[in-house]
Image: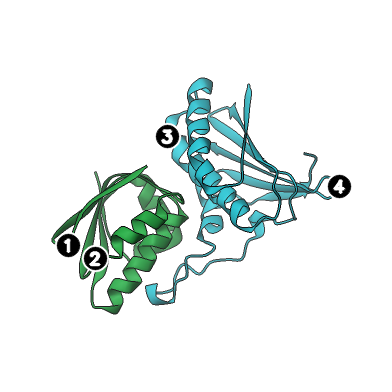
Amino acid sequence: MLTMEGGAETPVVLSGRLDATQAAAAQAYLDRLHGIVTLDCSDLQYLSSAGLGVFLKTHKRLLGAGGRLRLTAVNRHLQDIFSYSGFDQILEIEPGR
Amino acid sequence: MSESASFGRRIDALAEIFAFTTAAFARQGVSGALLVDVDFVLEELFTNIVKYSRGQAPVSIDIVAIPGGVEVTLTEPEADRFDVTEAPPVDITLPAVQRRPGGLGLHLIPRLVDSVQYGYSEGERCSRIVFRKTSASSPGAAGRNGEERC
């Protein structure tokens, strides 16, 4: 289960698990946002390649309009996924505690 | 003690798979710290089957505790041969605008577990993927492949 709150003027807070069953809903949520979009990942427990696809598509769309996607409070598991996939080189990622 | 369960080939079966792994880990005393990587690998393998495989029969997952971790076996009947340990490489150095999302899951699997083995039985048209995850993981271990019986 994944919940998403915020956006526009505030960070988007993701809570739960972003897997293949949640990717379409997450994509639809992020598709509404523009500019520099910050994702608060402090309560994001799990991310699969489906979630990576959502982040990549969103980041590319935002880049095309002068914005970008940035992630904060990223846990150890997510850091590993971003590192092994090279996403740590294309996204602004701030580790969590 | 090995635990086994079967799952229909649909994406929303992932919730059942994650419930099964969570319960099996608890019953077998496997460290919960390993669960997230096991779930990741199972999701990537299972969704790959759902998206690309032509078979209809349920896919089974077996979980057994081993010293320091767990061994997981995913068995797919009515399968065509597709060695997940020899998936095409993904260039993770490309800039964002040149990136495509496909293939990342299989690229990540060997980096998250100790070992991955792929086997295929021609006679039974059955594939079997076995992976191990322990607390002493040494990511990047090469896969070992061979003829299997399902």
Q: Which mark is residue A84?
A: none
Name the residue tied to disc 2. Answer: A33
Q: Please, which chain is the residue tagged with disc 2 on? A: A
Mark 2 lies on a secondary structure that is: loop
x 28%, y 72%: residue: A62
Disc 1 packing (10 Å; few <14; some 14–19; many ≥20): some
Distance, label 3 to label 1, CA atoms, is 35 Å
Distance, label 3 to label 2, CA atoms, is 34 Å
Name the residue tied to disc 3. Answer: B33
Q: Is residue A56 left or right of residue B51?
A: left
Q: Position of residue A10 (x, y in %)?
A: 15, 57
Q: Please, which chain is the residue tagged with disc 3 on? A: B
Q: Is residue A20 left or right of residue B51?
A: left
Q: Position of residue A63 (x, y in %)?
A: 29, 75
Q: Please, which chain is the residue tagged with disc 4 on? A: B
Q: Are marks 2 and 1 in contact (CB under 8 Å)?
A: yes
Q: How is the image coloured?
A: by chain
Residue A90 seen anywhere in this rendered image of the structure: no
Disc 3 packing (10 Å; few <14; some 14–19; many ≥20): few
Q: Which mark is residue B123?
A: 4
- Residue at the far right in the pictured view: B123
> What is chain B's hue in the picture?
cyan
Discs 4, 1: same chain: no
Circle 2: residue type: Leu
Q: Please, which chain is the residue tagged with disc 1 on? A: A
* Foreground tag (3 vs 1): 1
Distance, label 4 to label 1, CA atoms, is 57 Å
